[in-house]
Amino acid sequence: MIPIIFVMPIVQLIVLVHAATFEMKNIRMVVVDNDYSSTSKKLVEKFQRSPFFIISNRTNSYKLAEEDIKNGNAEVVISIPENFEKNLIRENKDKLQLVVNAINGTSAGLINAYSISVISEFNKELAGRNGKPAAAIISQKQINTFYSFWYNPELNFKTFMVPGILVLLVTIIGFLLSGMNVVREKEIGTIEQINVTPIKKYQFIIGKLLPFWFIALFELAFGLTVGKLLFNIPMVGSLGLVFFVASIYLIVILSMGLFVSTITNTQQQSMLISFFIMMIFILMSGLFTSIENMPSWAQTITKFNPVAYFIKIMRMVLLKGSGFAEIKTEFFSLLFFAFTMLSLAVWRYRKTS
Amino acid sequence: MQEETENIIYVRDLVKKFGNFVANDHLSFEVKKGEIFGFLGANGAGKTTTIRILCGLSSPTSGEIKVAGFDAFKETEKIKRNIGYMSQKFSLYEDLTVTENIRFYGGIYGISRKEIKVRTQILLEKLKFEEVKNTLIKDLPLGWRQKLAFSVAIFHQPKIVFLDEPTGGVDPITRRQFWEMIYEEAHNGMTIFVTTHYMDEAEYCDRISIMVEGKIAALDTPLNLMKEYETKNMEGVFLKLARNIE
């Protein structure tokens, strides 16, 4: 059991952080250049030099380019119209077409943002040379994406993901271990022997909670170390604050696990319920999809999601260096959940059926 | 008043229903202090249900039940202070050692560390368990485990100990030793409430009650019952009773 508890998070941290990254490198771009001018070449060169893009194909037929997207050989098409250079010089403006494969909305948004940043840089250069503004851009299937690059200037998604994934690991370990625990004693029958003693209900629940609390806190420390060593994640804020919040957060999660454990009769039931709850918590935690982009009813639900609070706090403290004052709303919400869930678990545990 | 203190278990019209099913149908009996009270019955007759109610593990539907002077409806936690319990389901922690299990249960009853140490030593000597004191429970043979489970159940020196089929699946020699342990405790004033399937064991009890379909069909000393039903052993009594009902 001990090796599982400690090897699993390392493996997951390494795999998940690389897999769940939104970072886009090597975006394949098809260039449809109908202008063949030095300006259009310069623009294409600019894309080529960017670390994000590789030019996968050049053609002068827009149809062929579209085929590439359909066949999955490219993610984006840039179409430069005829007389692009001429119009730029004569009329000071022209239009470019950018077609992004938006099957995956998140990456489409990113591709769009990256492309626009390359083009606008190109624009500035042109303007600098000609002393006047240049090309305007129209992009099809435009998605309004605003990425805040503050506190993560290199747009390094690993540093963004690690704190969140650590929360997940601690949550999963804590929830599953505590969720299986009391129900396991029901299955093997030792719970009867406990229930027939004069032990107090809160004593029992706290006794069950403490070992997992220590394991999970140790696990967090362990994960942070791995994150620092492997990904060099920033730790701007106070680690003491992180652990202080974590100690409250874990009471929420472990109490929920124990609550599930007291209402079920077999480990299978407990597993199913735990997974169901965790899936919702994790998918709505803001780790993989940002909460701001959710519909408002879903945002309301996330107000009851402790995972979302802790991920937010972890990011704020580790990446931004927030102090207690900035996270106190989230912190007191967690404190409230901890109190409620712990009381629920104690209340629901029955010594007499 | 004398009578009151002697009846350590007092049950009047105990009824326990699970939905429409009546598991215990108006049971009435008393158990005296220091008595070995046998509780017999076929599988599903309702023995375990009764034991669980007396131990405060299950709430009765109606009736008047006092265990060690406490009410089985309202004072279950006080009852639990005064009883020991050993269930048919094996109840020690298999992944803990012998001494760890003793220490754990001793701790729950609030016995001091020092006292636990002293009593553990005496217990290990008595059971001749010194060699296996650091062995995991799962590595012990069943008979040994049952003897240890009994010792742990009475480790806090309760007034009453409830044994729910304590010798199920145990070999005759160990059963014999087990009953010697029971006799010793009874001799020291502990009340023993025991259910069993083995009719020879029934004859070891001071008094026995035989349950059939949720009711008490007979309650007396083994000798009187054998006389009344004109048989030579308890097995005969049991069979006659079961047949009568049918």
Image: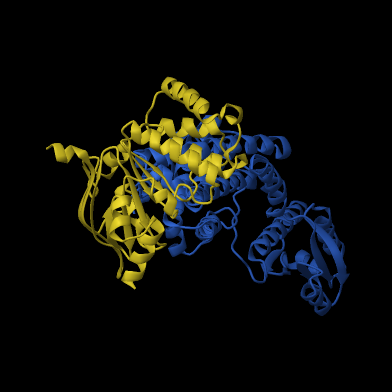
Chain colours: A blue, B yellow
Considering only vertical position in the picture, is B127 above or below A305? Answer: above
Query: What quarter of the picture does the C terminus of chain A occupy?
Result: bottom left
Do we see residue B189 in this rendering? yes
Q: Which quadrant holds residue A60? A: bottom right
Residue furthest to the bottom in view is A63
Considering only vertical position in the picture, is B158 above or below B89? Answer: above
Residue positioned 43% across, 51% down in the render: B200
Count of marks overlaid on the render: 0
Q: Position of residue B2 (x, y in %)?
A: 14, 36
Q: Position of residue A132 (x, y in %)?
A: 71, 57
Residue positioned 37% across, 29% down in the render: B110
Nearer to me, A162 or A204: A204
Nearer to me, A283 or B122: B122
Q: Is residue B191 left or right of residue A149?
A: left
Nearer to me, B23 or A2: B23
Residue positioned 37% across, 34% down in the render: B185
Q: Position of residue B169 (x, y in %)?
A: 53, 51
Nearer to me, A189 or A20: A189
